[in-house]
Amino acid sequence: MRKFVNHRAETLKPSGIRKFFDIVSEMKDAISLGVGEPDFITPWHIRNAAIRSVQRGYTQYTGNRGLPQLRELISRYMHERFGAEYPANRIIVTVGASEGIDLTMRAICEAGDEILIPDPGYVSYIPCVQLSGGTPVPVRCVQENGFILTPEALEKAITPRSKALVLPFPNNPTGGIMTKEQLEAIVPVIVKHDLLAISDEIYAELTYGGKHFSIAALPGMAERTVLISGFSKAFAMTGWRIGFICSPKEIDEAVFKIHQYTLLCAPSASQYAAMEGLKDGFTDNFAVVQSMRDEYDKRRRFMVDFFNSCGLTCFEPRGAFYVYPSVKATGETGEAFANELLRAEKVAVVPGNAFGEAGEYHVRCSYATSMANLDEATRRIAEFTRRLIR
């Protein structure tokens, strides 16, 4: 039956994240630091809004773009929280931010188009480009620069075929962010080469020691930026599969057509839940996420201190909920370290090379789990590491 399989799908690599998640799910007493999913339950008032919508019989399709009231709230939220101005009629409610990534790549990619992707970066960008017929081009980001995208690295990667640049900040897996000044530094390169910016801001609310800044808030950039975000991470709503995409007019029209013919609309109950979540989302004291962010911050500092204390150099993340330590001191690659750790100590981490070649000697650990789990996991990792570093 292989002759019936699309070549792009056949040659696609399986997700490095899901592989370890699937193994752990069947391993007794294992602790997973692998999957990036909040351990918090969706706040009750959000869950209750979905329950009420079902009780009232709001179970039909919504419009393809999503509920008008929700899109108005998203438009206001993006403007008041992050300074990004997109009218409700250019916002599409999607089945998670993941659909937004897929839609964007399918809407813009022609054969041979190059899409610039910071390395390390989230696992879905490269496959989505490949499945859309484009060519992913990694742009190396290094720890010495805080894993940011520099103008010099960007300029070096650009060719006449370059079409768009993915901006995945706060970054998964590194936790790196880009400040207003750092974004301003790359804008002249983007404009000079007439690139489309694709800004994945799913972790915007999980920024520590300051407020997230969106490239779409810079003068003239909303007109050339596709902004993708959602409710999964900051609102603890991963299973609700609810996100959104904000686009320039021409991109929006193409994305909308693909969305119409594929997903039709996001689940209606999830949309009512998202509306409830945004109702108090217009101040710096965003009650829905503040307590979760504070808890993540405590875990973040614990994990950074732990890895540095046991000889595994660890960058201090400024966003998201991951640490990305180097395991080079053990003499192992990230993949070997992750496999041996899982076998020997039943702790699952993700090899850094799942996020690009730059991660060969790194692993990613999610701290979106309880302190009790982190205490036990770090005890096991310390024991394992002591046997490797002598």
Image (cartoon, rainbow, N blue to C red):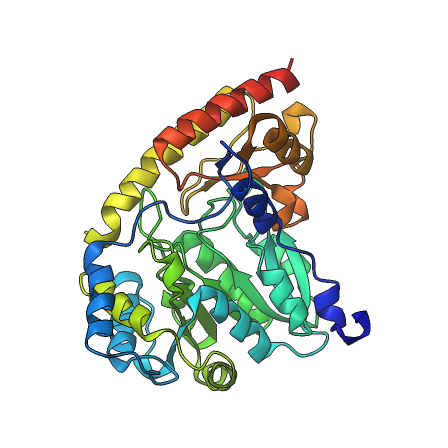
Image coordinates of residue 232 in percent, x first then y, are: 38, 58
Image coordinates of residue 273 in percent, x first then y, are: 26, 66
**Residue at 27% across, 40% down:** 294
Above-or-below relation of 21 to 343: below
Q: Residue furthest right?
A: 3
Quadrant of the rendered image containing residue 372: top left
- Residue 134 in view of the camera: yes
Viewer-proximal residue among 35 and 82: 35
- The quadrant of the picture occupied by the N terminus is bottom right
Quadrant of the rendered image containing residue 163: bottom right
**Residue at 30% across, 67% down:** 78
Image coordinates of residue 61 in percent, x first then y, are: 35, 83
- Residue 80 in view of the camera: no
Q: In the image, 334: left or right of 224?
A: right
Image coordinates of residue 113 in percent, x first then y, are: 68, 73
The count of marks equals 0
Viewer-proximal residue among 202 and 264: 264
**Residue at 54% across, 63% down:** 166
Viewer-proximal residue among 26 and 164: 26
Viewer-proximal residue among 46 and 366: 46
- The quadrant of the picture occupied by the C terminus is top right
Q: In the image, 227: left or right of 360?
A: left
